[in-house]
Image (spheres, rainbow, N blue to C red):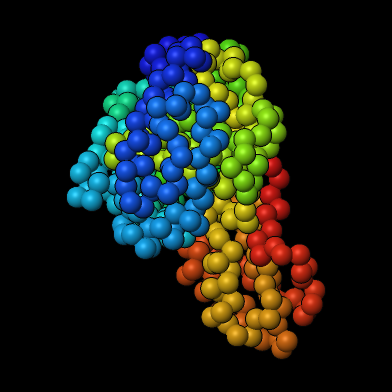
Amino acid sequence: MARGYDRLETRGPRVREREQMAALADAIAVLARKRLWRKRFSGIDPAALKHFRDLAAIPVLRKDALKQLQAENRPFAELVPADLTGVAHLFTSPGPVYEPEGASLDWWGTARAMHAAGIRKGDVVLNTFAYHLTPGGFILDAGARALGCPVIPAGPGNKEAQLELIEHYRPRAYVGTPDFLKILLDAGRELGRDTSSLQVAMVTGAALPATLRAELEGRGVKVRQCYAIADVGLVAYETDAPDGGVNPGMVVDERIVLEIVRPGTSDPVAPGEVGEVVVSRADAVHPVIRLGTGDLSALLAEPSPCGRTGARIKGWMGRADQKAKVKGMFVDPSDVDRVVKRHPEIVFARLIVTRADEQDAMELRVETEAEDAALAGRVAATLQAVTKLRGAVVRVAPGSLPRDGKVIADERPVG
């Protein structure tokens, strides 16, 4: 492979397992002494945890349980030092779930993914993820700065201002959702603005269909994607193939121990079988042990052709629950319930998530007894206020929506 980010990427599998498990055992030993976590780790001897398979004895912690623990034991359910030593920023994500950012360089680990994508020291980076309350903007910002890249903290939206920044600062790299990159390139072409400085993109937070990748690369921007979450930062990332294309799947980040379990259980599945992604990270500021992400993927049996020796996953393959990530933001069934409860006219509702013009799109279908021409507008405003996303609202006849337990139907193609 081309020169890697560091020696960790080419460790022997046994060395990686030994080093990662030793770090996790130390983190578990500390947590097991804390009042809130004593029960979870009862019967677990940290010194006996030698192999990845040994983690299966520890129950998976899922987001709903973490949310409850944080609500009852603020702010971070005893996972973070009480005096917030070593913490740089405090965030919230939909749920709500609360996350810290450690103060160390590239605490989120995204420099590794950006390096694999071809971003190098001195490249100006246009970061279009939000910097407000949620950690998205900071997760990629930290990785870029760790590489020695100056960052334009643009955030999402405001196409015209971003096009002016692109012409003035000439960024080589873009980070954000693939949808917004297309929006910027389309707007640049329509308005006659020069976006030719953009040569490489690190995208995440939204689906990247093969058709969209091909269109973006056909316009001169090499596109690579990573999989990152607010709880641990980088989880996995794409790598270059020898022919300049992209290797199948994603390489798991060196800070992460990743398992695939049967959804709703703590039981690992066989390589190749689709299940829920569970992550562990030994970190002094915010240790994470067997956290269920709610995302679906599968382990690939063979190492990456790029020469990195870590585990690989197929990539993001949907959600184990009904949460849907739309334009980089999670929408939860509870969000739909909040919208319905604000409008007593609604008898039943179902949120449909699709793709239109290479962008995520939402449509809330609502059953009402009486027709009300103004209702759709009122409900759409509530939907945007609750989810921070725009969506269409369509009235349907009472009884016409399926009663199959689904509140959110994600109808976007996978892959």
* Along the viewing direction, whichever of 111 and 43 lies nearer the viewer: 43
Q: Is residue 302 above or below residue 197?
A: above
**Left or right: 181 in relation to 409:** left
Q: Nearer the viewer, residue 361 or 68?
A: 68
Q: Residue at x 53, y 73 (%)?
A: 338
Residue found at x 58% / y 72%: 337
Whether residue 197 is visible to the viewer of this picture, yes or no, is no
Q: Residue furthest right?
A: 400
Percent x, y for residue 182? 55, 43
Please give the name of the residue rendered at 65% of the width and 42% of the height, measured from the top-left corner: 262
Instruction: Tell me the quarter of the picture where residue 213 sits.
Output: top right
Residue 221, placed above or below residue 304: below
Foreground residue among 80 and 328: 80
| Relative image position of residue 111 (x, y in whole percent) | 38, 29
Task: Name the quadrant of the C terminus.
Answer: top right
In this view, the residue farthest toward the front is: 43
Residue sitting at 68 percent across and 30 percent down? 270
- Answer yes or no: is residue 271 visible: yes
Label total for image: 0
Q: From the viewer's perspective, is 376 left or right of 17?
A: right
Front residue of this view, candidates 94 and 80: 80
Quarter residue 244 falls in: top right
On screen, residue 400 above or below 255? below
Give residue 329's position: percent from left, percent from top: 50, 54
Q: Please state the horizontal and vertical placement of residue 377, each as a whole percent of the image.
A: 58, 77
Left or right: residue 174 compared with residue 79? right
